[in-house]
Image: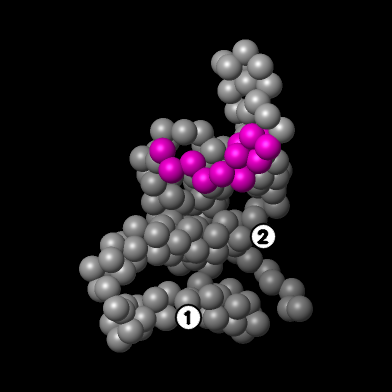
Amino acid sequence: MQSIAIKQTKNDRVWAYTTMAAVFALLFIWVVPNTIALRHVLLVVAFLASLMVIKANAELFIRVKAAIFPLAVLSLLFVWVGIHYVFFSLNPELELKEISSLWVRTFLGFVAAIGLGISLRKYPELMKFFYIAVFLTPILNVGSYFYASYLKGVFLPPGAIIFFLFAKIET
């Protein structure tokens, strides 16, 4: 793999830290009920900050051809969604609703992930915040389980912890 010398500017550092902060907050509140609006705001902030990180580091994609290939392949997924909608959709109204909710968020997260990857590579000191966020999320889930058990006055059945660890909270 090629050695990549990456120039660092003050503006770039601000966008990288903003990306990390938005992703950190997003991972932290992801499992907390009734935070969907905040999740969407954080996703948009992470997306916008990542766009600035990507723009400032566009030369990475020009100099390191191998780095662009996986991103190009993943990007084809979004192209396929558009092709499927235009040419193969049996229920265009339902599919457009799905595209405008699920797939827009997926695209925002995709761009945020690219910006986060660049930020973590350029600024290794951000890695500790990333690990804290990743490991804090399941701890928060288990804490939610114990809090729900406390509210009920008894431990919830053993199968109930699966809900707290793996259930998608839509509120």
Where is residue 97? Give x, y as percent: 28, 62
Q: Which residues are magenta?
A: 159-171
- Above or below — where is 126 with respect to 1? above
Residue located 43% across and 50% down the image? 43
- Can the viewer see residue 111? yes
Q: Quadrant of residue 140?
A: top right
Where is residue 73? Give x, y as percent: 55, 81
Where is residue 56? Give x, y as percent: 49, 65
Q: Quadrant of residue 122?
A: bottom right
Residue located 34% across and 63% down the image? 98
Residue occupied by mark 1: 76
Q: Nearer the viewer, residue 80 or 23?
A: 80
Residue located 71% across and 33% down the image? 158
The magenta stretch spans residue 121: no
Quote the CA–CA distance across marks 1 and 2.
Answer: 25 Å
**Does 109 sit left or right of 126 as displayed?**
left
Q: Which mark is residue 121?
A: 2
